[in-house]
Amino acid sequence: MATEIEAWITGPKNDGVFSLEQGKGEEDGPYGSEDLNELEVNGNWTPQEKALHEARLKAKAKRRLRKSSSRDSNRESFSDSVSGELSTDPHSPKGKNAVNDRKSRTGKGRGLPKKGGAGGKGVWGAAGMVYEVEEPDAKDPNYDESSQGDTVYATVVPELDERELEKTINPIVQEYFEHGDTKEVEMLLKELNLGHHKYEFSSLAVSLSLEGKASHRELTSRLLSDLSGKVLSEKDMSRAFDKMLKELPDLILDTPEAPQMLGQFIARAIADHALPMSFLDCYKGKVDCDHARAALDRASVLLSMKRKIMRLDNVWGVGGGQRPVKHLIKEMNLLLKEYLVSGELSEAEHCLRDLEVPHFHHELVYEAVVMVLESTGDTALQMMVKLLKAFWQTGLITLDQMNRGFQRVYDELPEINLDVPHAHSIMETFVDLCYKESVITKQLRDSCPTSLTFMSKNDGVFTEKKCK
C-alpha cells in the first residue's frame, strides 16, 4: 500500500486535479470504492487516501458534464451538481451557460442573473416586488392618451398672417353683403385665429363697403355693432378706425367721398356703443391731415344734431327692399320731378341705382307715363321718352319691367281719363314716339287701347259707347 501511495504522489498532475485517463486507471486500483467507503466508516483513512477519494469524485463530475453537453441538454453549473468549489471557464465552449440561463454570457461580471432575475421578456419582476401607482408621463413615447381616462382634445388653429388675412376676410364680407346674417359671420370669425390682427377685420369690412352701395354700408354698421363685445372689443374698433383715418389719402383716390363716409361710420359706431364716447376727444388738436380732420368733423356734426344719437340709425338710409312701398314710390316721383327740372340723365340714373330695387323699376315706368299724361305741353313727353330710352339702353330697366309699367297704365286708363279728358290721345302719341325710339316693342304698342269705353245715360238706360 505504501508503494501505491508513493506512486500517486509522484505521478503526473494537472493543476492539482488528476486527468481523466489517470482517474480511469485509478478506479481499478487496489482500493475500490467499497474499500474506501469501508475505511471511511471505520475512520481509518489516511490524509493521502482522503485526497485520492476527492480527486476521483471531481473526475467523475467532469465526465458527467461532458456527456450532458454532447446531448444538447440543459447545462447545469458545476456548483449545483457537486455542491463543491469547482467552476467552469466561461470562455470555454464546454463551459458556456445554457440558452435559457439568465446569467451573463459575456464572461464578465460575477456570473449573477441579469437584474437580479427580474429582467427579460415576459418577466414581471423579481419575486416579492410590489409596484406603486405611477403617474403617466405625457412625454413617454409609449404614452397612450386614449387609455388615461378623460381626454380633452383641443383644435390648434394657426394664426393668420397679413397676406392670408385679407384673402380669408374678403370672401366672408362679400357673402355677408348678400345674405346679411351677422351670426354666420360671427361663427366664421370664431373659427379663425386672427391673433393680434383681429382689429383689421373692421378696417377691411369698412373699406369694402366704401366701394359698394349704401345698403352695404348699412350692413357693415350693423355687423360692427353686433360683433362688438363678442368678437371685437372697443380697443379693436378704435385701432381699426385709427388705421383708416391714417389711410384716408389712399382711400380717397378710389372713393372721393371717403372722408364723409368714414365720419358717418365713426358717428354710427359711437351711437351703437361699438366705439367709446371719448374717441373723438383723443384727436382734438392732434390731426394734421385735412381728410382725417374732415372725417372727424363730420362725425362730430352728426353726433351733435338735434335728435342726436337716435337719428343715426338711418344715417345710411334704409336699404333696398327693406323700404316701404310708399316710400319707394315717393322717392321715384321725386326723382322724376328733379329730372324734369334739371334734365340730367346721369343724376337720375345714379339716384335710381341708389334705391337698389331693380325688381320695382316697373313703378318708375308707370309713374313716368302717368306724369306725361297729367302734364301740359310736349316738353315732359319728349324728356320722358329720352329718359326711358337711356334706362333701356343701359339695361337699368329690363323688357319685363318696361312691359309691366305700360300695361299697368293701359289697365288704369279709363280711370285716368276721368281726371285727364285728353289722356287717350296723349297716350297714343307717347306710345308711338316710344316705339319709334325703340323703347317698347311693336306688340306692346299694338296692345294700347285705340278707343275709350264709357257708360252714358239715355232715357234712363245705360248704354256703352266708343268714341275716337
Image (cartoon, rainbow, N blue to C red):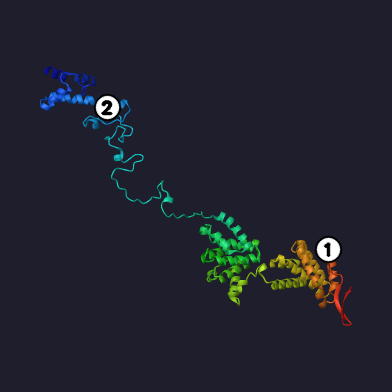
Camera-side residue of 180 and 242: 180
Answer above or below: position of 148 versus 125.
below
| Residue 420, quarter of picture | bottom right
Tell me what residue is drawn at x 77 percent, y 62 percent: 399
Answer above or below: position of 345 versus 144.
below
Label 2 belongs to which residue?
65
Tell me what residue is drawn at x 30 percent, y 47 percent: 130
Q: Amino acid at mark 1?
A: Gln
Residue 356, x across and y down, in percent: 69, 66
Say if residue 289 shows up in the picture.
no
| Residue 416, quarter of picture | bottom right
Say if residue 271 shows up in the picture.
yes
10 Å neighbourhood of mark 2: few (<14), some, or many (≥20)? some
| Image quarter hosting the C terminus | bottom right
| Residue 202, quarter of picture | bottom right
Question: Under tag 1, what secondary structure?
Answer: helix
Residue at mark 1 to residue at mark 2: CA–CA distance: 124 Å
Residue 385, x across and y down, in percent: 81, 67
Horizontally, residue 242 falls left or right of residue 458, namely: left
Tell me what residue is drawn at x 18 percent, y 26 percent: 54
Horizontally, residue 85 falls left or right of residue 175, namely: left
Residue 260, x across and y down, in percent: 63, 68
Q: Amino acid at mark 2?
A: Leu
* Label whose residue precedes the other's in the sequence (1 or 2): 2
Question: Under tag 2, what secondary structure?
Answer: helix
Give the farthest residue toward the bottom: 459
Answer above or below: position of 308 versus 43.
below
10 Å neighbourhood of mark 1: few (<14), some, or many (≥20)? few
Label 1 belongs to which residue?
443
Front label number (1 vs 2): 2
Give the farthest residue toward the top: 3
